[in-house]
Amino acid sequence: MFKIQTLNKISPKGLEIFPRDLYEVASEFTHPDAILVRSADMNQMEIPPSVLAIARAGAGVNNIPVERCTERGIVVFNTPGANANSVKELVIAGLLIASRKIIRAVEWVRSIADEGDRVSELVEKEKSRFTGPEIKGKKLGVIGLGSIGVMVANAAVALEMEVIGYDPYISVEAAWGLSSKVQRAETLEKLIREADYITLHVPLNDDTRGMLNYEKFRMMKRGVKILNFARGGLVNNRDILKAIEEGIVDRYVTDFPEADLLQCENVIPIPHLGASTPEAEENCAIMAVQQLRDFLERGNIRNSVNFPTCQLDISGDTRILIANRNIPDMVRQITGVLGSAHINISDMINKHKGNIAYNIIDVDGDIPSEATEQLSQIEGVIMVRVLRPKEFSPLDR
Ligand SMILES: NC(=O)C1=CN([C@@H]2O[C@H](COP(=O)(O)OP(=O)(O)OC[C@H]3O[C@@H](n4cnc5c(N)ncnc54)[C@H](O)[C@@H]3O)[C@@H](O)[C@H]2O)C=CC1
Ligand SMILES: O=C(O)C(=O)COP(=O)(O)O
């Protein structure tokens, strides 16, 4: 039985894909085989040695100690694009609430509940306090043109905004999906200087942490509105509060509120609702569970953030999975051990990503435990696992 530990609530639509005769799913396990997580912070967590994989039902993996996992041969998955539409829709709402004073206006209307018959009259008298501009014709700067950024950019084009995008690492697939009306910013500075609205859609990492700071705010148009549905750490809170005080930033809509932001009227805090739709929760859970099953039962890897994509149709009786450092002479040493043990390889694949390489080796017959032991002892080998895939039923059940 595989033991799957869940660190957050995961949609039952995903969990039900685990066959009951093969998997146990619970929030507490001493020796889980894999972990399913959403936003729970695992950075300080002691990850048990039994863990083979971690699946993030979502996009951002800054809550997972990815480097530490790689060193231990733990495969970390995410679910690219599975919650992108949900975030896109909230970003569009964010554009509108940053522009029209909807939230303040609603709060004010509630505050006159005791005025009885005068409510209608007061509404007409006071509504001019809450006017705000249309977004049509304004310029939106999209930083990061991945799954979410592309959808946001295209939706803004459909709303007749002018859109400028910045992403020096844009994928070919994302570029194909982007409206030809989106202008390309060669530099972040160009986007920042021109935009009336700026929306962030990049991952939080050492390169992007604090990417919007006072130096950048100083370059922006006065009255710019900033939307952050990516991660709090991308914006320097102290600097944006200063930029608001100086009238540079008019509104900051953030899905990642922190205490220091909450006293400021121009900050619109949302409790991390970007991916909180039933559709996104289901899509992410289903994708995460399918990827975990394919890895645990077959050793195949899809959508890992730290391991290469590596898939092989089953051709032998036994499947050996090996993760090793991406250094010379590994394949010779691995096949050497199998050759010496008179084990016939029926098929194999070797792929790498950065410093890590991953091998799927299908062999005829069994593999003696001494050979497995010898494989583990090759210098540079991080993980060895042996599977008998034909014992598992088809993955689509
Ligand atoms: N508010 C919420 O609930 C959610 C927030 N997110 C956040 O949004 C982020 C983006 O999500 P996706 O679009 O699905 O990810 P993605 O991986 O499809 O796109 C990220 C894009 O950022 C680009 N990028 C990376 N570094 C950059 C840099 N320095 N400057 C400009 N572009 C850069 C990449 O090339 C890529 O195209 C996630 O990493 C996560 O932090 C994602 C889903 C839900
Ligand atoms: O997918 C992401 O990166 C998100 O931020 C969504 O987080 P959540 O799964 O809603 O806790």
Image: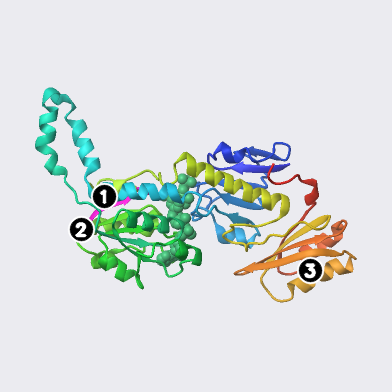
- Label 1 or label 3, whichever lies nearer to me, is 1
Residue 379 image offset from top left, x and y in percent? 74, 69
Count up the numbered dots.
Answer: 3
Mark 2, ligand 1, within 8 Å: the answer is no
**Whole-Å distance between the Cαs marked 1 and 3?**
58 Å
Question: Label 2 amino acid?
Answer: Gly
User: Which one is in front, 291 or 36?
Assistant: 291
Query: Badges 1 and 2: C-beta atoms under 8 Å apart?
Result: no
Residue furthest right as drawn: 342
Q: Which residue is mark 2?
A: 223
Magenta stretch, main secondary structure class = strand
Would residue 48 be found to the left or right of residue 85 on screen? right
Per the image, is 253 magenta? yes
Write down which quadrant ligand 1 falls in: bottom left
Can you identify the residue that label 1 sits on? 98
Q: How is the image coloured?
A: rainbow
Q: Residue furthest toward the bottom?
A: 328
At x 62% / y 69%, what residue is drawn? 355
Q: Say which label, 1 or 3, has the lower sequence index.
A: 1
Would residue 346 appear left or right of 171 to someone viewing this image? right
Q: Amino acid at mark 1?
A: Ala
State the quadrant of the C terminus: top right
Q: Nearer the viewer, mark 2 or mark 3?
A: 2
